[in-house]
Amino acid sequence: MHPYEATASQILAQLRDGSLTVEQYAQSLLSRIEQRDDDVKAWAYLNPDLIIQRAKELDQIPKAERGPLHGIAIGVKDVIFTKDMPTQHGSPIYEGASPEIDSASVSILRHAGALIFGKTTTTEFAASQKGCATRNARDPGRTPGGSSSGSGAAVGDYQVPIALGTQTGGSVIRPASFNGTYGFKPTWGAISREGQKIHSLTFDTLGFFARSAADFKLLADVFEIHDDTPPEPEFGVAGASFAIAKTAVWPKAGPGTVAAMEKTAELLRESGARVEEVELPAEFAQASAWHKVLLDTDGKASFLPEYRRAADRLSPTIVGHVENIAGHTRAQILEAFDGLAALRPKLDAIAARYAAIITPSVPDEAPVGLHSTGDFCFNAMWTALHVPVINVPGLLGPNKMPVGISLVVPRYHDQHLIAVAEGVGKVLEHSAAWVATN
Amino acid sequence: MHPYEATASQILAQLRDGSLTVEQYAQSLLSRIEQRDDDVKAWAYLNPDLIIQRAKELDQIPKAERGPLHGIAIGVKDVIFTKDMPTQHGSPIYEGASPEIDSASVSILRHAGALIFGKTTTTEFAASQKGCATRNARDPGRTPGGSSSGSGAAVGDYQVPIALGTQTGGSVIRPASFNGTYGFKPTWGAISREGQKIHSLTFDTLGFFARSAADFKLLADVFEIHDDTPPEPEFGVAGASFAIAKTAVWPKAGPGTVAAMEKTAELLRESGARVEEVELPAEFAQASAWHKVLLDTDGKASFLPEYRRAADRLSPTIVGHVENIAGHTRAQILEAFDGLAALRPKLDAIAARYAAIITPSVPDEAPVGLHSTGDFCFNAMWTALHVPVINVPGLLGPNKMPVGISLVVPRYHDQHLIAVAEGVGKVLEHSAAWVATN
């Protein structure tokens, strides 16, 4: 196995026992990128000299002083500040912009010894479908999803083991599903979002891409994301209870997602789990519409500075937010804000009855073409309700493209979720990349 | 009248008719500061050469291209990024730090033609009582309040007409009251908080200091803070209905605040208003405790980067947040978060029955000494409930120090609030700085 193929947890062991240096590891990743970048185009900024310099610095650190993520390469979505690289937000307005500051997340990762590798592409401000040429890790003719396009593609393509993304609609879970990676959107508020471009304070959440659930455990520990009750050391699927929540958006599910949901239930049952369908109370049907109202109106305040300075260089989506073309009133904003707030504890109570809720990550396989990054319709409600979500890969749709499923648990049960995702992931991996047939 | 004595609205008229240049205006403010800075110490960064250079640039702009705030000098609290000045957060960790980026608010103000004047002092990260030597504009032996200490003192002392502050507990309203200025905390979310140090996403709100309510109208228009129904062009106190809400914290009110509340009711009644006492339902008594829970736990995530890098250079308050010395559980965090969310529409409904709720801004006059910036007990609930608040000055306590009162209205009625504050302000000003007697 080449070093670039390893997960973060696997490579950590080699870096710790001295069988691999950070510099060697970085060279392996760079050679993979060199080979693949023309097809995938996952990077908004990548400076091999800087990477090797930082890798050498990490190799110089005495063993006793190394952090828990020593040498782990991490891609950073280009709406997140990095003091030694530009941050351009996928927008021509910020071309070449390079504020010399680290986001809270990058600061914590750097301090833990991570090798901040480069900036991954994003659609414009992580808020429109415009602005990046990145292609799917599995098929250059398809979208990698968005807005964390480069992070999903880079991790899916073995260019880095971990990447940071952000989710306001479905920008972590969707590209994770499309590129066949794990994706983790923690509980809203569990990690500081300082130093990231804001679209919606109500929804924006820092998230992660990785190729194993165990890697999320590493990250959750570094970010001190703890549950009130630590989860069992190893979660067993046998005897556990799962809910299938198709939600009000189910009519949008295509054949790949329909088959993936059925196959997941079947595999879990075969492994000894109880799986039952749960219908959320009718009031939850409002959640997606309320999410949309706040996406628009939070975007109005967030993008006013860019609108004032350079409206002609913004996409119509962003201009539409600022000009409130949807015509939302303040009363409607408050109805959405308070309505979602009232649903949050209700969802927690329902989710607490199960090991996890299983729900679609996407309508289907990644769409063909690069003109659209896909639809976040299956993610909006969970983002709006602040619950942690993990996309679990392992199944393939009719065109042998990945179709993930989402696991959802109550807020602040992130460590439990990671344990469940590890258990469910094993079951899906055992299916040996089961392929849905048309 | 010297130019430095004018409000923003007054000086705009002179800048527009050409009777004053921006450079002349800047010189007037600088001369005031030169005279007073040893006593007040409101500035964390002030560069007269840069100010004059910017002022000259503004004077060069053709009249037709000038923005709505052309030439208006604005002080910026030192937790808010300015691309041409350091941002040091009142913390030794950020001494000399100078990320070359503007916050959303500064970007909008600059685009509107404002003269970004300098950085005003803040307590450490706007989150502890530590870290600034600023003194009250009316008495150098007393605190100016915090955490927006420099903004309150600079506006109160006629060093700038407007300054930006932030409020997470009571950091705009308290220094406004202590320094005898107007203070405006808009509805949470109405203005982007991008590019400000985060303490609590749930509460942090950008706010303003000025010496007239009319100046807030200028700012609300620039930031596109609109109500669903535009307020009457001139609000008349006569015939209007006000509620007096003493709240569960009333036992903390000292003689200055007790007298100010009584005098305000008396003056409004004399002007033809109806004033009645309203008792909030018992569940509102929880709001301050819930606010404290989220202040601590949001602070845990927000200050984790600084804690990891330099815990020994943080005050015990900040360390306590990160180490969760209060021992809040995740269940308690959610109870607080959801509990406050449920109260918000209830408060809106109560407040909507009146022109405004009148409530204390502070326990009393600014305390003697600089060891404490005072108590935000009377502000916490309103911050937590996201409602807009204006501190109206005009009355004095037993030691002839200012004691303001707060006006509160439902969320997103900010323009209405400004109109009411203008009306109430006139009534209090007519009292000719009425002094409470011991």
Image (cartoon, coloured by chain):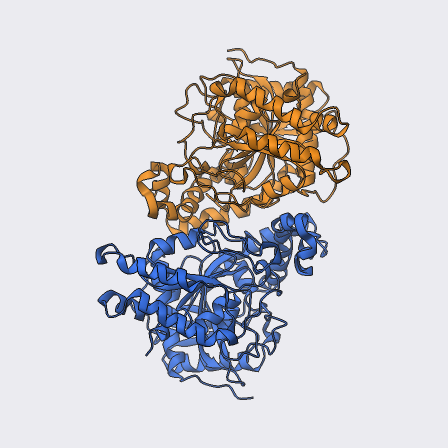
Chain colours: A orange, B blue
Q: Is residue A81 left or right of residue B59?
A: right
Q: Residue furthest bottom?
A: B437
Q: Is residue A42 left or right of residue A21?
A: left
Classify B134 as above or below A70. Answer: below
The image shows residue A154 at horizontal and vertical percentages of: 55, 25
Depth order, front residue of B227/B316: B316
Q: Looking at the figure, which quarter contains the N terminus of chain B? A: bottom left
Closer to us: A277 or B35: B35
Residue A402: percent from the left, percent from the top?
A: 55, 19
Residue at point 43%, 35% (across, down): A90
Residue A430 falls in image quadrant: top right
Q: Is residue B1 above or below residue B57?
A: below
Circle count: 0
Q: Position of residue B135 (x, y in %)?
A: 54, 74
A113 w.r.t. B231: above or below:
above
Residue A303: tell me if it is visible: yes
Hey, which quadrant is residue B95 in on the image? Answer: bottom right
Question: Which quadrant is the C terminus of chain B positioned in?
Answer: bottom right
Q: Can you say whether B227 is above or below A409 in the image?
A: below
Pick whichever, A19 or B427, lies toward us: A19
Q: B146 or B422, which is in the foreground?
A: B146
Q: Is residue A75 visible?
A: no
Q: Residue furthest top?
A: A437
Q: Where is residue A52, by image quadrant? A: top right
Left or right, residue A394 beside residue A174 = right
- Residue A416, horizontal then vertical, whole percent: 70, 36
